[in-house]
Amino acid sequence: MANELLVVEGLKKHFPVTRGIIFKKQVGAVKAVDGVSFTLNEGETLGVVGESGCGKSTMARCLLKLLEPTAGRIVFRGQDITNLSRRDMRPVRRELMMVFQDPYSSLNARKRVGFIVAEALDVHGIGTPAERKRRVQELLKVVGLNPEHYNRFPHEFSGGQRQRIGIARALAINPMLIVCDEPVSALDVSVQAQILNLLKDLQQEFGLTYIFIAHDLNVVRHISDRVMVMYLGEAVEVATRDELYVQPKHPYTGALLSAVPIPNPELGRQRQTVVLEGDVPNPIDPPSACNFHPRCPRFHEGHCDVEEPELRTVDGGAHRVKCHYPLEKWPMSAEEMRNGASRTAVVRQ
Amino acid sequence: MTPLLDVRDLRTHFTTEDGIVKAVDGVDFAVERGKTVGIVGESGCGKSVTCLTIMGLNESRSTKSSGQVLFDGEDLLAANPARLREVRGQEVAMIFQDPMTSLNPVHSIGRQLVEAVLLHNECSKKDARRRAVERLKEVGIPRAERRIDDYPHQFSGGMRQRVMIAMAMINDPELLIADEPTTALDVTTQAQILYLMRKLQKDHGTAIVMITHDLGVVAETADEVVVMYAAKVIERGSVNAIFNQPQHPYTWGLLGSLPRLDANVDRLTQIPGQPPSLLNPPRGCRFGPRCPYVMDICKEKQPDLLPVSYDPDHVQACLLDEETKIREIEKLKAAVLAEAS
């Protein structure tokens, strides 16, 4: 068994919704993250997928304690960091880094690249100025940029190059865990491939652990060892990559997979697609019991809307799913998908 | 039969402070009635500008366009503004990427839909409203009679895109130009919208020009594909030809750099470098500086768009000999397609 680097238990983040100006009264809460648990082993990549608004980014920010979690426990290398003060958090922060989605707004436009990359070294008081400069130039080379670009400003670089700067900044203090929040979704496919390859190379070279957040299932499949699917603030399925993509168990995962267009005209037009009706519900007022029941093609009235399913293990392994009626096989026909449900699945060819 | 839209040697040049940007530099393609043409390429390759030029929506002061845009035999580039206004929204309609910025936030969607009807038809407001409700129902807006008086911010992203589609389809256009219609949406919503567009196309016989950077979307929707790189068409053919017998190294690169659900690839093939600046494009083949197969002649001569010997409908602009190409196509297929089974 590999070393557990990070253990998260029942993580919740609720944002209060208030009414009134002076006497603010809390009238509700946006349940952005509502009870997420997982473990992360050293050296692996955990992919997190879900549609926009499902709480992926909020979860990432809670993990780094950029947001205070409402409830739950975060244990990093055996140390509970949930309630650490800012000062106590500082040594822990040396091991946790983040790469952001938008390479345009995440780099300070008024600072030179050298300063941006060296800032973390500065904050943690590592090295003399000359050593820092050498380190930055070395890092620029590692991420495939020219070390002579040390004195340039971010606007002189293209989107892909900026994302490389963002990665160099995250690497500067040799962290153990890097949380990548949609690092390639703003990039074109050819550049996206460059960044994905770079992330894989760096992982091998420095033994990094990644949490890789994305909405693109193809990208997550490419880079992850294990994948967690989120829906409305909850993890609905966790499995190794191969199991999840070949044998999805949760109807939502199935619907997501079948919605991804395949770049192969013959295959893409033959396969069956599960069409989800409607939109993601409002997290202020999530549906009762199973969150997914209003859209689920396997909805059983009187069960799914009354009793909340547990995130339980299926197939005796590490495959966990939060559903009363997990998929028996994949892909499925409309009839099999229905399986006595109170709703007819919309499956089209 | 003449195609519905025939774009011939289209060029659009913008005058900027830094010089002339040749955003579109010789683009040819045709759209048959009731068919879908997909235009793919990376950002900045000129796919959106091509469509804006077709619609006559570029800023006129700094833009110079040449070539021909034959819509039903009529050259839209030469048409006067009054005629263009007649065509837009009536015969050719457009959907944009971001449904929030393309709907007017201070008017109810009903008002915006009714305006589109009244502009092109002699009918009463009541009839126009009835038609708007009908269309909203058709695109799958629940409780359309009530929601028609809602404002754009009261709709979700997917719903807004449905409203945009309803607005574009309200006068039964013959041609619909969709500029990245699903890029801002989640996969499940994207599937809904693509499904809807296909259904409307079947019911109304509309031809669609689908601009996208997502090869998956193209593979699932288009009949014909146009691949653009640095303001030029580098390859054009039927969807099966492009995905099964791609001829241009750039197309190979695009297909190889795609992480995909239907294959396990350990390492993506990457295209080195960046797309060139259109202010000062490289001499000869524009893909030359990034091409792994580059030859001396590529640096001198701009390759022409020529048909492939065994498929006259499939044209490509690469000087590489056919033998090498067949070998490379087989390699690409072995790497990607073998695992698809």
Image (cartoon, rainbow, N blue to C red):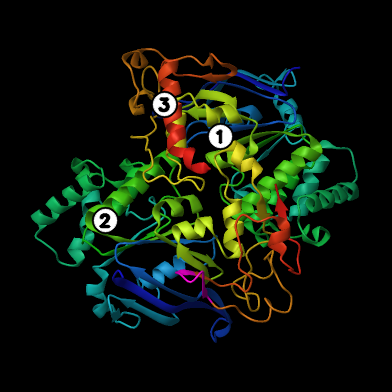
Residue of label 3: B328
Which residue is depicted at the point 69% across and 63% down?
A297
In percent of width and height, residue A282 lies at 62, 70
Name the residue at the front extreme. A316
Q: How busy is the neighbourhood of tag 2: few (under 14 within 10 Å), some, or many (20 plus)?
A: many
Left or right: B183 with respect to B148? left
Examine the structure image and report whether residue A317 is included in the region drawn in magenta: yes
Between marks 2 and 3, how big is the CA–CA gap?
38 Å
In the picture, residue A21 is in which quadrant? bottom right
Q: Secondary structure at mark 2?
A: helix
Span highlighted in magenta in the image: A311-319
Left or right: A179 with respect to A202? right
Q: Amino acid at mark 1?
A: Ser
Q: How busy is the neighbourhood of tag 1: few (under 14 within 10 Å), some, or many (20 plus)?
A: many
Q: Secondary structure at mark 3?
A: helix
* Circle 1 chain: B
Between marks 3 and 1, how big is the CA–CA gap?
31 Å
Question: Which numbered disc flags the more N-terminal residue, 3 or 1?
Answer: 1
The N terminus of chain A: image quadrant: bottom left
Between marks 2 and 1, how big is the CA–CA gap?
34 Å
Residue A188 in view: yes
Instruction: Please say if A7 is above or below B84.
Output: below
A256 and B78: which is toward the camera: A256
B16 and A239: which is toward the camera: A239
Task: Check if mark 3 and mark 1 are on a common chain.
Answer: yes
A263 and B123: which is toward the camera: A263
Q: Residue B48's mark?
A: 1
In percent of width and height, residue B192 lies at 67, 51
Residue of label 2: A169
Examine the structure image and report whether residue A293 is included in the region drawn in magenta: no
Q: Amino acid at mark 2?
A: Arg
